[in-house]
Amino acid sequence: MWPAELAGRFPSPPNDELMTQALNAARLLAARVLTRDAELRLIWDDAPDSAALRKLIASLQQALAE
């Protein structure tokens, strides 16, 4: 759900079928962010806090599992 103050700026939330598809895709793709050749991971590996990406992805995966 969009925050109430932004409701007029964004489209309505997807129906149940589309939300299920989006969640399934997000669950699959979140794991791919940390693969050896993932571009986002390669960018973050050179950052001073490269462990932050792993923490963020773990948090995202936990939220998607609920």
Image: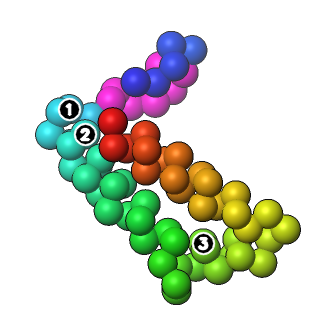
Of all residues shown, which one is farthest toward the left?
Answer: 17
Left of 66 or right of it: where is 41? right
Residue that label 3 marks: 40
Tell us which disc is closer to us: 3 or 1: 3
Residue 30 visible in this rendered orientation of the protein: yes
Residue stretch rendered in magenta on the structure: 6-13
Magenta stretch: helix, strand or loop mostly: loop
Tell us which disc is closer to us: 1 or 2: 2
Could you tell me if the residues under marks 1 and 2 are in contact, i.e. CB atoms within 8 Å? yes
First in sequence, mark 3 or 2: give its number: 2
Please give the label number shown on residue 19.
Answer: 2
Whether residue 8 is in magenta: the answer is yes
Residue that label 1 marks: 15
Left of 14 or right of it: where is 31? right
Numbered disc 1: secondary structure? loop
Q: Quadrant of the N terminus?
A: top left
First in sequence, mark 3 or 1: give its number: 1
**Could you give the CA–CA distance between mark 3 and mark 2, rounded to whole angstroms?**
25 Å
Q: Measuring 21% from the left and 43% from the top, which residue is drawn there?
A: 20
Q: Amino acid at mark 3?
A: Leu
Q: Amino acid at mark 2?
A: Met
Numbered disc 2: secondary structure? helix
